[in-house]
Amino acid sequence: MKNNEATIFVFIASIIIGILISMNIGFKGKINFLDVKQYDQAYNERTKLYSELNNLKEQYHSTSVKLKKYDTGDEKTLQVSKEIKKEVINNNLIIGNSDVQGQGVIIKLEDGADSFDKNVTMNQLIHDSDIVQVINDLRNAGAEAISVNGIRVVYDNWGICYGASIKLNGVNIVTPFYISAIGNKDIMYNYLTLEQTHTSLLQRSDVKINIAKSDNIKILAYNGDFIYKYMSLVNK
């Protein structure tokens, strides 16, 4: 009899608990259920936190590996020297202080009129602004290194148009202008021929322009000085 009573009691208690849960009522207060939108937000937030946590773990692992390289004596000094040399090489590649080679495109630009032609119009001439905008097209297309008539293009290059010649970083260069760029040759070529680019506009104008792909282009290092007038390192 007692077993039956206990069974009945458990059965009734289970029913009561089920009713309370269905009514969002808990023993310690109200149970909050998430709707679909709230669930998505919570899920996305959790995913974001997991991603950040994984990134931190990877950074920690990378830093730990570097620290282990510098543990002891002469090996520590040698390893530090190698790491510094590696960073210097990478920085020289980025800022243009090293000779580089690779696939890319070569653009040849010429004035549309003969130099002895007396009836030359502005639309038949290549200007410094044309050179700048073609360089911008190449950068937008992913060019990693650019030169104009053998002069490496870096962040502070400047050019001024002087009649038939253009002065680039103080050096007079004359037509034809050869602009070499290292990068994915197919992507750059296809981008340059898009209708909205300045390079494509020149193709439809009165100047002469030719774009050719190349499997091996060599661009020499920038041999000028890098001048910093206003920027300085941030103290951390």
Image: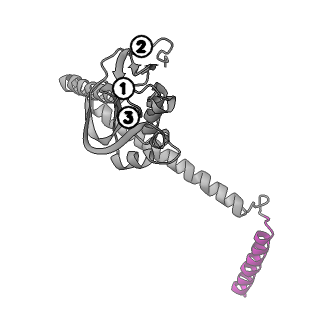
- In terms of secondary structure, where does tag 3 sit? strand
Q: Which residues are magenta?
A: 1-25
Mark positioned earlier in the residue sequence (3 or 1): 1
Instruction: Give me the C-alpha separation between circle 3 and circle 2.
Output: 30 Å
> What residue did someone put label 3 on?
109
> Mark 3, residues whose alpha carbon is within 10 Å: few (<14), some, or many (≥20)?
many
- In terms of secondary structure, where does tag 1 sit? helix
> Mark 1, residues whose alpha carbon is within 10 Å: few (<14), some, or many (≥20)?
some
Q: Amino acid at mark 3?
A: Leu
Residue 234: x %, y % from top left: 49, 18
> What residue did someone put label 2 on?
227
Location of residue 199 by image quarter: top left
Mark positioned earlier in the residue sequence (3 or 2): 3
Instruction: Give me the C-alpha separation between circle 3 and circle 1.
Output: 26 Å
Name the mark nearer the viewer: 3 or 2.
3
Q: Does the CB distance between marks 3 and 1 fall below 8 Å?
A: no
Q: Is residue 11 magenta?
A: yes
Mark positioned earlier in the residue sequence (1 or 2): 1
Q: Is residue 35 above or below residue 10?
A: above
156, 70: nearer the viewer? 156
Q: Is residue 35 above or below residue 7?
A: above
- In terms of secondary structure, where does tag 2 sit? loop
Q: Amino acid at mark 1?
A: Ile
Residue 97: x %, y % from top left: 30, 24
State the quadrant of the N terminus: bottom right
Query: Residue at position x 23%, y 27% from top?
Result: 82
> Mark 2, residues whose alpha carbon is within 10 Å: few (<14), some, or many (≥20)?
few
Q: Is residue 29 magenta?
A: no
- Left or right: 225 as drawn, with respect to 47: left
> What residue did someone put label 1 on?
95
70, 192: nearer the viewer? 192
Tag of residue 163: none
